[in-house]
């Protein structure tokens, strides 16, 4: 008897309820919709309904995540097809998200040097295929209170507008900012445009009282600090 070798299942070979899990593995959690993320938590649907349809009904019932995060166990279980086990999984995930959002200042990352800033961003930014201009907003203790991607694309002083950089600083009551962007080539050597953008932001920061502490250029496992290079 001849047997055929076992082959790896392709995405199309998975049942509908398995596809969100497969996409998360292949593309990461950010690629999934709210419906798909909840489907992963619910795991299965029923003979009459797929888990994606069940997830969609749940979101529709609570008008999205905003009301779902405040729902009681009984309210979630009132959805046909969701028993106690599924409801508990949903509530546990919501509570985990709430605790992460409410982490105290003591849990926040502190930036004391250019190396600290580069370490915080390196793994996230060094593989990006486009230039991303990112700002880290710090409190008076140099703890990171927020991270924001301000611009995606080639850097120049006319496109990276100070208004966008400092608007979030005012919203977060930030004391200072560390700017960073990546070079997809892997070479973090600063260009004239990088230097021009930096000097413009530093000047604006001085006028409004919010310091630009540094501008980091992230390459392939290496970085350049424009402050250390004397450009600011």
Image (cartoon, grey):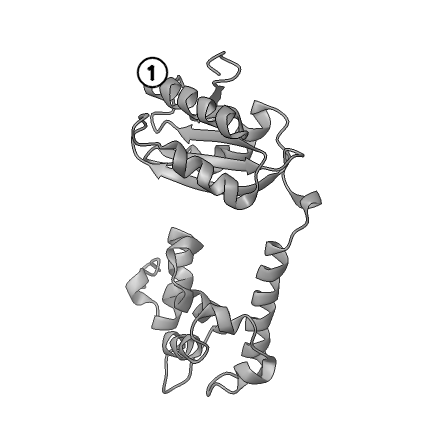
Toward the front, the furthest residue is 207
Residue drawn at 42 percent across, 52 percent down = 28
Can you say whether 114 is above or below 103 in the image?
above
Expressed as whole percent of the image width and height from the top left, the position of residue 137 reads: 54, 37
Residue drawn at 36 percent across, 87 percent down = 48
User: Dot 1: what SS?
Assistant: helix
**Left or right of 115 in this view: 8:** left
Expressed as whole percent of the image width and height from the top left, the position of residue 160 reads: 35, 32
Q: Toward which corner of the image does residue 35 lie, by quadrant?
A: bottom left
Can you say whether 32 is above or below 61 in the image?
above
User: Is residue 127 visible from the viewing direction of this image?
Assistant: no
User: Is residue 174 visible from the viewing direction of this image?
Assistant: yes
**Left or right of 5 in this view: 107:** right
Of 62 and 23, nearer the camera is 62
Can you say whether 141 is above or below 6 in the image?
above
Q: Quadrant of the N terminus?
A: bottom left
Expressed as whole percent of the image width and height from the top left, the position of residue 161 reads: 36, 33
**Left or right of 100 in this view: 5:** left
Of 72 and 123, nearer the camera is 72
Can you say whether 88 is above or below 1 in the image?
below
Expressed as whole percent of the image width and height from the top left, the position of residue 31 reads: 37, 55
Residue drawn at 47 percent across, 42 percent down = 168
Q: Toward which corner of the image does residue 143 lie, by quadrant?
A: top right
* Residue topped by disc 1: 192
Residue drawn at 42 percent across, 40 percent down = 149
Q: Toward which corner of the image does residue 46 lie, by quadrant?
A: bottom left
For label 1, the crowd category at 10 Å Cα-Cα, with few meaning under 14, some 14 to 19 and many 20 or more, is: few
């Amino acid at each position: 008897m001849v047997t055929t070798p076992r082959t790896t299942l392709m995405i199309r070979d998975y049942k509908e309820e398995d596809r969100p899990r497969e996409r998360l593995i292949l593309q990461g959690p950010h690629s999934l919709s709210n419906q798909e993320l909840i489907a992963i938590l619910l795991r299965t649907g029923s003979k009459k309904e797929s888990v994606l349809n069940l997830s969609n009904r749940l979101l529709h019932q609570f008008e999205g995540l905003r009301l779902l995060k405040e729902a009681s166990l009984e309210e979630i279980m009132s959805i046909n097809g969701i028993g106690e086990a599924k409801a508990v999984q949903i509530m546990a995930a919501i509570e985990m998200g709430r605790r992460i959002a409410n982490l105290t200042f003591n849990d926040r990352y502190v930036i004391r040097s250019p190396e600290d800033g580069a370490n915080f961003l390196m793994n996230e930014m060094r593989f990006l295929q486009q230039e991303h201009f990112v700002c880290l907003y710090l409190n008076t203790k140099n703890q990171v209170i927020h991270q924001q991607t301000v611009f995606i694309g080639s850097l120049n002083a006319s496109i990276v507008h100070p208004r966008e950089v400092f608007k979030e600083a005012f919203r977060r009551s930030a004391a200072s900012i560390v700017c960073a962007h990546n070079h997809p080539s892997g070479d973090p050597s600063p260009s004239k445009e990088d230097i021009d953008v930096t000097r413009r932001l530093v000047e604006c920061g001085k006028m409004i009282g919010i310091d630009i502490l540094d501008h980091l250029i992230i390459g392939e496992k290496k970085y350049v600090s424009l402050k250390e290079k004397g450009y600011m």
